[in-house]
Image (cartoon, rainbow, N blue to C red):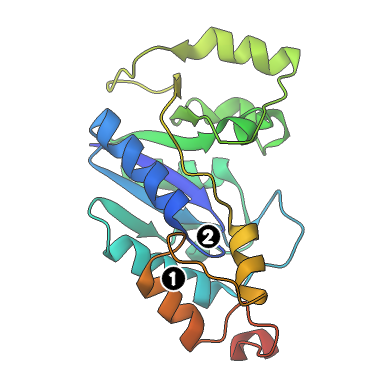
Amino acid sequence: MLIGLFGGTFDPVHYGHVNAATAVKQFFSLDEVRMVMNSQPAHKASQSTPIKYRWEMLCLACAATQGLVADDTELRRGGRSFTFDTLQDLRQQNPDTVLCWIVGEDAFATLPTWYRWREILSYCNFIVLNRPGQTAQWTAEMAALRDAHECNQLDVSRSGQIVKLKLPMLEMSSTDIRRRLVNGEPVQGLISPDVADYIRDNGLYDKHSTPQEALA
């Protein structure tokens, strides 16, 4: 099998996430894309919406999109979420599967700050996406790594490749969507109706109410 892995806090999951994941799946004919939800993101200091709500929104979004699977590997492991640990877990569970980590170019350029980053390419391929409005800052070390491992096409029989994929991506962010929701602004076309209903029913991102789990 050939599986894509798309990690994130999904706070909330939106059409930008779904569009990127499905575009990569179709382009490379992946068997599925697993949307790996972070428990405690290693690179984000801000407090996220409680896991219960982010997970249930992600499940709703994946259920509505063929080929996307909500993955709770990092939630079950607990603690801080590190890509290396997740890949190691998934490799043990799927020893004969080729794993492809899907990441924006701006985030990929920060790879040397990731936990055990030099070992990650032994577990997966990287599919690197251009992100609208984002400019990657490459260090000499990262530029050398990119040049050594970059491929024009994905060889489905092995790991250790870096494939840059230039496909049109939707320009949206969870930060902007949260701001819109707090201010009562419309979010049609940004999140699915099921996710929008869930947010409303649970009082998420509403400055006048607080989810019960957040009070615990």
**Residue type for callout 2:** Phe
Percent of width and height locating residue 193: 37, 72
> Regarding mark 2 in the picture, which secondary structure is present there?
loop
Q: Quadrant of residue 166?
A: top left
Residue 167 in the image: above or below residue 174: above
Q: What label does residue 10 carry, if any?
A: 2
Q: Residue furthest front?
A: 186
**Residue plotted at (49% across, 31% down):** 129
- Evaluate whether residue 3 shows in this view: no
Q: Residues within 10 Å of mark 2 (few under 14, many from 20)?
A: many
**From the viewer's perspective, is 46 left or right of 159?**
right
Between residue 203 and residue 38, name the one nearer to us: 203
Task: Determine contact: label 1, label 2, CB under 8 Å.
Answer: yes
First along the sequence among labels 1 and 2: 2
Residue shown at the point (33%, 61%) measured from the top left: 62
Say what amino acid the circle numbered 1 marks: Met
Residue 194 image offset from top left, x and y in percent:
36, 74
The residue to which callout 1 is attached is 57
Residue 215 pos. (x, y %):
69, 90
Determine the residue positioned at 22% across, 36% down: 1
- Number of numbered discs visible in the structure rendering: 2
Q: Judge by depth and name the residue closer to the eye, 45 or 165.
A: 165
Q: Residue, x 58% and y 15% (percent of image)?
A: 146
Q: Is residue 168 visible?
A: yes
Q: Secondary structure under badge 1?
A: helix
Task: Say which mark, if any, is on residue 45.
Answer: none
Q: Quadrant of residue 163?
A: top left
Q: Is residue 9 left or right of residue 18?
A: right
Q: Give the side of residue 171 with respect to residue 160, left or right.
A: right
